[in-house]
Amino acid sequence: MTKLKEHLPYIIAIVLLALVFFHRPFNLNELPADDRITFYFPRGELIKQSIARYNDFIPLWNPYIMSGTPFFAYPSTLGTDNLLGILVLVMPTVAALRLSYLLSIMLAGIFMYILMTNIKVDKRFAFIAALVFMFNGYALMMFRDGWLTSLNAYALMPLVLLFTIKAFKSKSWLIYSIITGIIFAIQLRGGPDLKVVLFTVLMFFLYFLFSLIGKNLLNGFVKAAIVSFIVFIVFFGLSAQKILPVKEYTDISSRGRTPWEQASSRKLAAEKMFNELIEPIYEGMPEIQRTGRARHVGIVSFLLIGFALYKKRKNKFVLFLLTAALLAILIATGSFVFYLLWKYLPGFGGFRYANRALILYVFSGSILAGIGANAIFSELDKRNFSKRKKNIAYFSIITAILLNLAVFGPSPIAADQANVNEAIKNNHVLQNLSKTDGIFRIETYETIGIDWGTEAYNIPLGLEHIYGYETAWYQPYINGYLNVALRNNNHAKFWGILNVEYLTARNEINLPGFKFIDKFEECNACWPETEDFKKAYGPYLYENELFLPRAYFSGNAVLVFGEDYDQITNFMIEIIGQDFFDPKHSAIIRGKDLKDLKRFDLVILGKSEIAQSDISSLKMYVEEGGILSPNIFEGEVNSDIGHVKGVFDSFKAEIKPIDDNSIITHSFERKEIKLNGSY
């Protein structure tokens, strides 16, 4: 208890400074126009809905975006196994979101303080390290831009290093190895996109290498290997539930393998190193809480780092931190080091933006700043400085750091804040659609790619969209189907197949297949200063005359078969785009085998090697009146649009809608069932 009292003033100071600099104004109903409202708020709402309506604490599916997409398996999704997921259980989503950011930055400072005191740095200088860790340019940028997953994982970096040190050095290495694995697992749950976790893992293995430096290399290696193995087993055992589905989804998504050009983009240029790493130089400086961004530690902290490197240049731990910082810089510059990691190390293959590595730089720099301050005052003690002079020097350093980073640094507060509930209430066009009966999806005319700014309304109002704000997507859907739909003149048909019944637009449009319904009042409470958000409230509303129900009977079924996935997919989409194709009359199915051919009125063969048994099935199918394109039994070798047009012209079945209850009891094995989108 006595020891706790010694540390309590510093912990209270960390909390108060976070409240002062990171939480203005104290309004738990507002969010800025950034990732908070576009990404994290709607997903927090989805978690709340899942629990309240279905008692499901681990929602697997998000029906509101991309015509339905994985939720739990998405790399950046936060579930109920992290701070935000816990907070939404007990308070409104907006308040939970704001508090999760604030608590993350507080915990970052507190955990850094705990780390420093455990590595025998005086509590006064542990506080300095905590300040640098909380107020460096990278931390301010994460907070201001709303990078919650990064901030969650960032806060836990000190604890990972603390228990890593204990695992490698302590006699109780087994228990500390287990704890390290647990904290790694918690960090992954809070930062599943790996933007921070990857560099924490890199730091762990760098410490592994430094632990081998000593007299008995073999024994040291054996112990370090055992510790690492236990950490990995515990970490993977607690994280496999998240890692495996995320990997499966990522492998088939746009992030399966990031091209080197994209991975190494946003590199740290040599001429910008001082501005990015140490202190930004800008016109009109100094400016109080200016706009702009950097990943700097500040000139005051950098001087402390320099003193630590000078006085402790032979200290193995200091050399470890220096190496970690230099490694981060090498990665951030897009050097051969980063290329090797991208090429060969799991996780880095899907990584984007080289300068994200600087999170390891500011982490190492914060620790070195505290060590440097400790070294300075050790020198003052040796020179018999009075207590008064040392107190003046200490508070001068604290003041200088706060002025340098918190006052004259970039502002952590984002502009264009709005009351979320008022914005949803005053989005008149979507409010109207939310009260419309039926099962349908919507589209925003101005959205032609990854969406930004509409989910904050759609999910609370229960509206399903065909686009969404994601950084990893299923490419055959976005780059394939929707891309073709945008290029095709018949938007109504392509979108109608996806169950799109309504379309909103900022201006009057004349789009074939859509009829005008009404012009609604514009929303003055919906982040009016953010241009990209204005599309979310129309005000023009149109109805799709080629809308199709989510499920219905189709009179004809067509099988497209082949081994070349891209070929047959593109051919299917090409067929859909033709005027002769009417989705009310025909269902197209991409097949992997040739079983039960009687269900299909037409079988289209793509590039494939057909087994003898399948040839027999095809021959019997043709002999019984089935249509084959190309008809390989008559010497045909190519299937083209003209080849199948006549067949589709013969399909005259009428659409037969069915209700939800019929879907549940009906046999989906019957050929006439057609399902559009997700179900």
Image (spheres, rainbow, N blue to C red):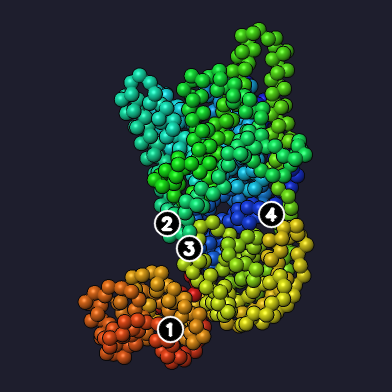
Q: Which residue is mark 1?
A: 641
Q: Which mark is nearer the camera, 2 or 1? A: 1
Earlier-in-chain disc, 1 versus 4 = 4
The answer to whether any part of residue 539 appears in the image is yes
Q: Quadrant of residue 669?
A: bottom left
Quadrant where the N terminus sits is: top right
- Rendered image: mark on residue 251: 2
In this rendering, is residue 280 above or below 397? below
Q: Which mark is nearer the camera, 1 or 4? A: 1
Earlier-in-chain disc, 2 versus 1 = 2
The secondary structure type at the circle numbered 3 is loop
Earlier-in-chain disc, 3 versus 4 = 4
Q: Amino acid at mark 1?
A: Ile
Picture coordinates of residue 140, whole percent (x, y): 65, 40
Q: CA distance from mark 2 to mark 4?
A: 31 Å
Q: Amino acid at mark 2?
A: Asp
Q: Which residue is mark 4?
A: 33
Q: Amino acid at mark 4?
A: Ala
Picture coordinates of residue 494, whole percent (x, y): 54, 77
Task: Please tell me which residue lies in front, 638 or 620.
Answer: 638
Q: CA distance from mark 3 to mark 1?
A: 26 Å
Q: Quadrant of residue 339?
A: top left
Q: Which residue is mark 3?
A: 474
Q: CA distance from mark 2 to mark 1?
A: 32 Å
Q: CA distance from mark 3 to mark 4?
A: 26 Å
Picture coordinates of residue 149, whole percent (x, y): 56, 47
The secondary structure type at the circle numbered 2 is helix
Earlier-in-chain disc, 2 versus 4 = 4
